[in-house]
Amino acid sequence: MKTVVSVVGKDSMGIVALVSTKCAALGANILDISQSILDDYFAMIMLINMDKLNVEFTEFVDEMEALGKTNGLEIHVMHEDLFNSMHKI
Amino acid sequence: MLSRDDISETINMIREENLDIRTITMGISLLDCASEDTTRLCDKIYDKITTTAKDLCRVGCEIEKTYGIPIINKRVSVTPISIVSQNRDSGDMVKIAKTLDRAADTLGINFIGGYSALVHKAMTNADKALIDSIPEALASTSSVCSSVNVATSKTGINMDAVRLMGTVIKKAAYLTKDTDSSACSKLVVFANAPEDNPFMAGAFHGVGEGESVINVGVSGPGVMARAIEKAGKCDFGELADVIKKTSFKITRMGQLVAKEASKRLGVPFGIVDLSLAPTPAVGDSVALVLENMGLEMCGTHGTTAALAMLNDAVKKGGIMASSYVGGLSGAFIPVSEDAGMIAAAESGALTVEKLEAMTAVCSVGLDMIAVPGDVSEETICGIIADEIAIGVINNKTTAVRVIPAYGKKEGDYVDFGGLLGRAPIMALNSRSCADFVNRGGRIPAPVHSFKN
């Protein structure tokens, strides 16, 4: 199962490291990262493989959102199927 | 591989444009609860609902978390209560309403629909008892929603029932006079009521349905308004394409959630309702969609045409996105629940008469319209009869949810808070229709209903 993680917030040093370290700790394997900065705002979209997750999926969602909150970022986790069903026939 | 643009588009729809799943509604049959003893009947109803839907809220929250889509409401609809409660008086009916309310409270859902009667041709004793009990039932419960089907294209309009509803609505308004006559916001009068509608206040689990079913309603006016704004100046053909594509995406999301909820709950998937359902949130407005199509304000000349095109294109896009489409499926135009409609009504651009014309081309009807509290019962019957006639003649669902706000007059406001929103009291035609609505009997079915 794959999941899309989006990260948005004011740019600062080490955001990619922060998020990817957390992913690794929870057993989430990053397959793809796309990142950009617009007007001081950082935006990153990651595609993540969740097959070897070492926590429950809902716990992963909570952990990522909490990580966002403590670091002034908006982190959202969304199942890949949502995008596939909305954008592919 | 997913494209970055597609991902960004979906995230924006949800985070910025208020896209959500408006409701996952579980329909539950109560036919097997029938019992001669009212206490026994109430116990069986309570047990059946709280057992069948015990996981509804938990599963709804899980799906919300997995897909990152807000699921605003989890609700239950049941078999029309008058069918499972024959041989009872109004007092017994109110007890059943309180049982439904208690079950809703236990489940943690915000509305339970099905305190209903289907009287499109005539009334049984139980139908009459239920209708008579509606004001007290709604005034003494918080989650129960009621609906009465007074007409179909096949049977014509039961004007005796219409006349009765005028009295019921006024009484319900009086009994909840301290809360802006809020009981009326939970009461719908229908023509051609659908049996699988997930939206309140008109949801009930039809007799043609199975034991239980999952029906889903999506929202999406905010997404539609933004898509049309982005399309800029284009001709109607291109505009229709933009609406269809957007509707397809919204509906696919609904289909995904409906299938997933059905799988996790072990309850069959029924339908996705394609209706664009607004909220009072800024931007999440059907009026704004129409205004972005090129109207200075919703309600001006051209509004009916814009709405007709919108509704048709939404269906064309949505039908391909779901295996089963049903319910009401159209654009909702409730006044109090739509910031753009409220603004249009305040400015005088949108009148009750224009709203009535708009309902001929969209679902559902005169919805959440606040009118002066001193309006006569007969005038309310006239409003209902007009709206119901549009549905019967055009073979579509129409409905009336009108609030004669006790003690208030034109220019005042009612405020229900939350999704039900606030509305200015709108002016009505002051001429009487009493002699017409008091004739009694049934308006015969239209000639084009004889298709056999």
Image (cartoon, coloured by chain):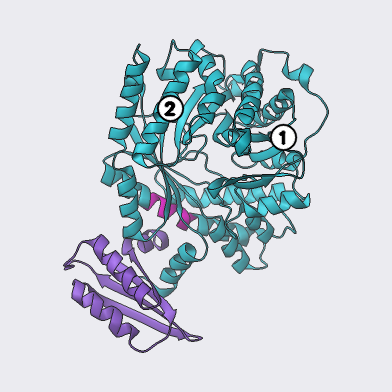
Measure the alpha-carbon separation of dots 1 and 2.
28 Å
Q: Would you say residue B426 sits in the magenta stretch?
A: no
Residue B358 place in picture, x, y as percent: 68, 42
The answer to whether residue A63 shows anywhere in this view is yes
Task: Write the residue at 38% across / 38% down.
Answer: B105
Around disc 2, counting alpha carbons within 10 Å, would you say few (fewer than 14), some (14 to 19), or many (20 or more)? Answer: many
The colour with which the image depicts chain A is purple
Q: With B353 as the anchor, is B158 left or right in this view?
A: left
Quarter occupied by the N terminus of chain B: bottom left
For mark 1, what is the residue?
Answer: B407
Q: Nearer the viewer, residue B120 or B75?
A: B75
State the image coordinates of residue B168 (x, y, percent, origin top left).
Answer: 61, 23
- Could you confirm whether marks 1 and 2 are on the same chain? yes
Q: Main secondary structure of the magenta part?
A: helix
Q: Look at mark 2 in the image and give the residue it sits on.
A: B98
What colour is chain B? cyan
Above or below: residue B207 compared with residue B61: above
Q: Residues within 10 Å of mark 1 (few under 14, many from 20)?
A: some
Q: Chain of mark 2?
A: B
Q: Is residue B432 left or right of residue B20?
A: right
Q: Position of residue B355 (x, y in %)?
A: 70, 42
Q: Amino acid at mark 1?
A: Gly
- The residue located at (65%, 35%) in the rendering is B403
**Residue drawn 77% across the image and 35% down it:** B428
Residue sitting nearer the eye, B377 or B222: B377
Earlier sequence position, callout 1 versus callout 2 = 2
* Magenta residue span: B248-256
Q: Amino acid at mark 2?
A: Lys
Determine whether, in the image, residue B334 is placed left or right of residue B256: right
